[in-house]
Image: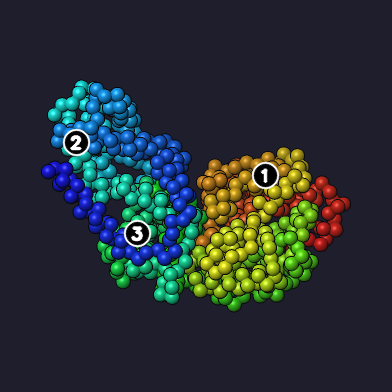
Amino acid sequence: MLLAGSACGFALRFGRVVRKIREAKPDADFHLHPLGKRVWDFVWEVLLQAKVIRERPFAGLAHAFVFWGFCAFALVTLNHFATGVDLPFLARHGWFGAFYFGFAAVFAVAVAVSIATLFIRRFVARPRWLGEHVSIESGVIALLIFILMITYLAQYAMGDTKLMWWLHTLALLIFLPLIPHTKHLHLVLSPLTVFLSRGEFSRIPPLSGDEDFGLDTGKDVTQIVALQAYSCVECGRCSEHCPAVSTGKILDPKQIILGVRGYLNEFGAKSDEPLLGKLISQEAAFQCTTCGACEFQCPVGIEHLPIIVGLRRGAVNTGKWEDDYGTKLFLALERNGNALGFSATERDKFIQKQQFPLFDGTQEYCLWLGCMGAYDPQGREIIASFARVMQHLGATFGVLKKEKCTGDPARRLGNDLVFQQLAEQNLQTLAQAKVAKIVSICPHCVRTISKDWREFGEAPPIEHHSEFMARHQEKLPKTGSQQKIVYHDPCYLGRYRGTYDQPREVLARSGEVIDPPRSRERSFCCGAGGGLAFLGEETGERVSHARAKELVATGADVVGAACPFCNTMFRDALSAVSDAPPKLYDIAQIAAASIEALSPRDTSSQNQRFAGS
């Protein structure tokens, strides 16, 4: 009777959550294939707890032991209740029962120590990422888990007694209905969340028809979004690594997810109430740099970026977002085809000055200039340097006569109409030019062309210039220089594309490569992504200044960048945070300088032809 009552208490609340998720609209583009990857992600992230441990080793290992303990105790718990009605299936005198009870006892010790450690961390140490308000429910759950382990160990040591049996039973019966009322609902939902992911990092789903404008009201919330909102464990890992949170912005990715959950609890997924408002701040949604640190860190499979971009879509596509800088950006993309708002003739003049060959189908590579490479003075220097490197390597290339912005800032800010127009026009241009391979200096262009354009057609394969140079690094000179180069991992090259070693391999030929405290997967954003490079001044501390301080503190002679947006952000930031800042160069500029230093006679004609603007 008690077990039935406990199960009923669980089912009533959990059933309400399930109904909230099921009443959300289906994700139009969701499919289970490839199934093998989903199974592997489930094994790696759920069963092995690898992501939990990797990103927070101490607390992660404690959490992992609690999870593994629950798995180990599944059989013991079933036998425990079976014993209550005199139908036990595990006996102490049997070889398997003796082994398994001992096996569970080892885990009971590990779980008891781990849950006590996590309790102290949450209620005594209290890292600020866990939040200002610590829920009492978390303490109650931790206490119940501790009681379960202690009572089991007492039974294992002293034999079954009615007192210990009932204490263990009551702890279980109280624990079960509490789960769906607390953040511990992730025990049930997070395995599903990990298994039913969108399939790749930060994948922005396509809109499902003319009436779909993004996440505008409750009716726009999809089942995956609802499932992820209810899976949040409130651990604060996303907040800890978010550049907006670290620099005093309103945005907190954890609060965005909890805001969606709060909306579903209050209004449901059939409501016409706007999502952005009381529970989710519009200002916060537009402070995201889309760096992906939150999504990369999340241990329960929540995909923050598609949700944040979805909220931006809902505001932009319905005209609810009013921002002078945003309006100016969208008009520049529509009228001029580039985010900087320059006439296309400026790009033509640059091409003519550098004497870049136009792509005619005979060259191996189409060199994609991008907005920064075609119009920004520093970006032009990077393009010119990379062109010198390509010529040194013997690679033939040409540039497109007509090339427009890939649409990355429009895509990340939620303007689907402008993005679609740019994507379709560029795809048509590439097809007409019969381009087979593309190389670009911009990770944002690489990501947008290779992934986001797929909604409208398949683009030729594209690689980043760091990957191109790394493949040919044996042909690049090794200078033997002792200068220290601190490399900054761009978000869209690192977390989005998984390219970490190649830029370092290129830089290593020109000096000693060192890393800042936050590097590789944990790299800190420059502040330019998500269209924020075009949206005016930031509130709070500038993200670029926070990162520049880290780079300067390494004592490096040179900051090596691999993204023109990072280069732009650090150009002023380094000078603002230091009286004697390190020099700032793109990896292509460093490689080109090494080529020129070791073979000036061979490159003198190239210097004249490909001189920086």
Q: How crowded is mark 3: few (under 14 residues within 10 Å), some or many (20 or more)?
A: many
**Where does label 1 land, which residue?**
505
Are the residues flagged by discs 3 and 2 in contact, CB closer than 8 Å?
no
Q: In the drawing, what numbered circle is on residue 82?
A: 2
3 and 1 marks in contact (CB < 8 Å)? no
Q: Where is residue 558 in the image (x, y as percent from the top left)?
A: 67, 47
The N terminus: image quadrant? top left
At label 3, the amino acid type is Ala
Any mark on residue 226, and which? Answer: 3
Q: Is residue 334 left or right of residue 509?
A: left
Dot 2, crowdedness within 10 Å: few (<14), some or many (≥20)? Answer: some
Q: Quadrant of residue 334?
A: bottom right
Rendered residue at 83%/60% (across/down): 608
| Residue at disc 2, secondary structure | helix
On the image, the x and y values in percent for residue 177 come to 21, 47
Q: Which amino acid does label 1 sit on?
A: Glu
| Residue located 42% across and 65% down the image | 28
Give whichever of discs 3 and 1 has the lower sequence position. 3
Query: Which type of secondary structure does the marked residue at label 1 adopt?
Result: helix
Query: Residue 408 is drawn in which quadrant?
Result: bottom right
Q: Is residue 564 visible?
A: no
Identified at 31% across, 48% down, the residue is 188
Q: Is mark 3 on a helix, strand or loop?
A: helix
Q: Nearer the viewer, residue 486 or 297?
A: 297
- Which scheme is used to colour this image of the protein? rainbow
Kindly identify the amino acid type of the residue bearing the numbered disc 2.
Answer: Ala
Horizontal and vertical percent position of residue 132: 33, 48
Which residue ends up furthest to the bottom in the rendered image? 335
